[in-house]
Amino acid sequence: MSLQNIAIILIRPKHPGNLGSAARAMFNMGMDRLVLVSPQCTITEESYRLAKGGKSILDSAPTCRSLKSALRGLHFVAGTTGKSGGYRAATRSLRSLVPRLLDYAARQKVGILFGPEDTGLTDEDLQYCQALIRIPTHYRAPSINLAQAVMLVCYELYMGSLARDPCPVPKLAPIQQVEAMYDQLEDSLLKIGFLHPQNARHMMFALRRMLGRAGLESSDVGILRGIARQIAWYAKAAKSCEDSGSQK
């Protein structure tokens, strides 16, 4: 199967050499959709030198000012992380997740996120991910160079694409629809006191993780947004009654 529906998204990359090496890795494995988010470096001669046959990938790579804008048009997003615990508790090994990524990529747009070289993906970056990828390494050297991580992911995707035909999967709602739903849910849950400003981020991350596992379709998003609207209406009506009572 083709890997053209999979985008490699580099968030705040710092070194021009890694841009070129990542492009070369993609070119070697038949992938060409590279996206740069708020890069901290420019594409230089070093980038082109290391890209070899992947120079055109660098030339065609769009630069986005925010991750949210980079995700427009995608249906499934996975993030890579070498850390564990906290928001990263539900990681899966790269090889075990490849079949799922390929099934979605057969007919839908998939993005794979890579964080900056020194820190990796932040908690804010991770909130957009429906799955977290862990690349197994020896315990003495758990950290992998950015371009190496891109190479490993592209290799596993390429090998997986040769070994099997994709299985039918639901058509997921576009990321922008899902994000609008989460914004509406958070606002409604704050209004009824289920969420509090001091814990809203933590609770919303848990909610995102739960719903992300479900693989939401557009109809699912519509139902959840309808629930959120009804919650907001009820909260407004309850407040109106409360205000009326206090004026008597």
Image (spheres, rainbow, N blue to C red):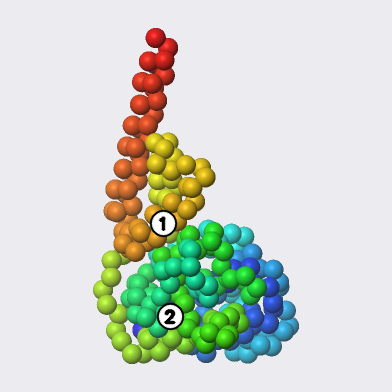
* Residue at position x 49%, y 71% in the image: 84
- Point out the image quarter for the C terminus: top left
Q: How many marks?
A: 2
Residue 207 at x, y = what percent?
39, 54
Residue 42 at x, y = what percent?
71, 73
Tags 2 and 1 touching, CB below 8 Å = no
Q: Quick one: 40 or 206, which is closer to the camera?
A: 206
Name the residue that disc number 1 marks. 206
Name the residue that disc number 2 marks. 94
Query: As shown in the figure, which amino acid type bears the numbered disc 2?
Result: Leu
Can residue 127 be seen? yes
* Residue at position x 30%, y 80% in the image: 166
Query: As shown in the figure, which amino acid type bears the numbered disc 1?
Result: Ala
Residue 238 at x, y = what percent?
35, 26
Residue situated furthest left in the rendering? 168
Can residue 106 be seen? no
Mark 1: few, some, or many residues within 10 Å (few <14, many ≥20)? some
* Disc 2/disc 1 C-alpha distance (Å): 22 Å
Residue 205 in the image: above or below residue 114 = above
